[in-house]
Amino acid sequence: EIVMTQSPATLSVSPGERATLSCRASQSVSSNLAWYQQKPGQAPRLLIYGASTRATGIPARFSGSGSGTEFTLTISSLQSEDFAVYYCQQYNNWPLFGQGTKVEIK
Amino acid sequence: EVQLVESGGGLVKPGGSLRLSCAASGFTFSSYSMNWVRQAPGKGLEWVSSISSSSSYIYYADSVKGRFTISRDNAKNSLYLQMNSLRAEDTAVYYCARDLYCGGDCTSPFDYWGQGTLVTVSS
């Protein structure tokens, strides 16, 4: 059974700074990895799929990298609207989400 | 514009049943696999069930297998989740979500989500 582990649980960042979020799979998921953003009271929004492809309408400041078991979501310069919880999801087999990383204002 | 609108949530006693619906519009519903994903209060996301475009492939998370049934009516552009033998741990917001690119026996990220419907299981 695959386990998805995100780190850190909480990331404190100042606006304009770079944020780097990690997601680790307990076994290879190839590039079948997506990232979602969720704000309070809202549904998740797809940001990245295929580990590195931005979804439609997603700003270029969001980028994804990695393959196999190690993945990273980078937000190059945090805007006020980027403070949210971010989830990774593997879809190599049954969909499975990580526990989330909360990006908060420092 | 793609829209997914869930309904049917509410308060139900342990052991009870509830049927959720998801009305889809703005896309060719019959071409896409669909999913239910839930989120317990203050917790993360949990995939619940998936159904392929023609209902040929259906999958469930172990946590709901044997209790929940997913179905769809392509003529009505609607997705359903019949939930039986409900437990306190089933309390969550339930989202319907569309597969980005899968219609059959395959996996895909989820590109459109509804606003969710809250199911509370409590005596």
Image (tube, coloured by chain):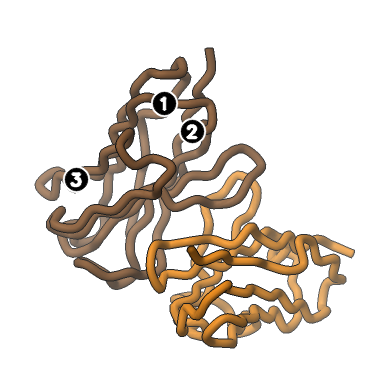
Chain colours: A orange, B brown
Give the quadrant of residue B64.
Answer: top left
Relative image position of residue A10 (x, y in whole percent): 79, 61
Q: Residues within 10 Å of mark 1 (few under 14, many from 20)?
A: many
**Residue B90: which numbered mark, if any?**
2
Relative image position of residue A26 (x, y in whole percent): 57, 72
Residue B37, above or below B12: below
Residue A65, above or below B80: below
Lower position in the chain sequence, tag 3 or tag 2: 3
Relative image position of residue A103 (x, y in whole percent): 76, 63
Q: Which residue is mark 1?
A: B86
In the displayed structure, does residue A8 sit left or right of residue A46? right
Q: Are marks 1 and 2 in contact (CB under 8 Å)?
A: yes
Q: Nearer the viewer, residue B25 or B109?
A: B109
Q: Secondary structure at mark 2?
A: helix
Residue at 84% in and 70% down = A13
Residue B17, above or below B82: above
Q: Which residue is mark 3?
A: B72
Residue at 67% in and 67% down = A6
Relative image position of residue A58 (x, y in whole percent): 53, 76
Image quadrant in which the C terminus of chain A is located: bottom right
Number of numbered discs visible in the structure rendering? 3
Residue type highlighted by circle 3: Arg
Comparing marks 3 and 1, which lies closer to the viewer? Answer: 1
Residue type highlighted by circle 2: Asp
Q: Give the distance between the C-alpha atoms of the residues marked 3 and 1, in whole angstroms.
A: 21 Å
Residue type highlighted by circle 1: Leu
